[in-house]
Image: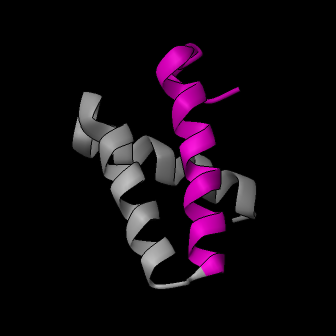
Amino acid sequence: MDAETERQAEARKVLAMYGADAPVFVAARIGALVWADDQSGIDRWRQIAARLDRLMVDPGPHGVVP
């Protein structure tokens, strides 16, 4: 699985688990990673956040992120 597909799957999973609270969960995760000074984790979760944002605005056919 390539990184793009993986991030999309992660965003869909977070949305399925947390629903409307998904952005709060992601923001808290990024905040924890900032405190831990984990730049690669921050980058990964920012990528997930971007896909989550798109997914929440326009899930596309069958919930597929464009």
Q: Looking at the rendering, in which quadrant would you find the N terminus?
A: bottom right
Front residue (pair 11, 20): 20
Look at the magenta stretch and give its main secondary structure.
helix
Asked if residue 52 is positioned above or below residue 17 in the image, the reply reads above
Q: Can residue 64 be seen in this view?
A: no
Q: Can residue 63 be seen in this view?
A: yes
User: Is 31 colored magenta in this rendering?
Assistant: no
- From the top left corner, tell me how far across and down residue 53 is, in percent: 54, 30
Taking the image as shown, residue 50 lies to the left or right of residue 25, namely right
Instruction: Determine the residue positioned at 53% across, 50% down.
Output: 9
For the record, the magenta segment spans 39-66
Instruction: Determine the residue positioned at 49% across, 54% down.
Output: 10
Q: In which quarter of the image is residue 24?
A: top left
Front residue (pair 38, 48): 38
User: Is 56 colored magenta in this rendering?
Assistant: yes
Front residue (pair 42, 44): 42
Q: Quadrant of residue 39?
A: bottom right
Q: In which quarter of the image is residue 29?
A: bottom left
Asked if residue 51 is positioned above or below residue 3 in the image, the reply reads above
- From the top left corner, tell me how far across and down residue 8 is, in percent: 59, 46
Front residue (pair 22, 7): 22
Asked if residue 21 is positioned above or below residue 62 in the image, the reply reads below
- From the top left corner, tell me how far across and down residue 49 is, in percent: 54, 45
Q: Looking at the rendering, in which quadrant would you find the C terminus?
A: top right
> Which residue ends up furthest to the front in the rendered image?
35
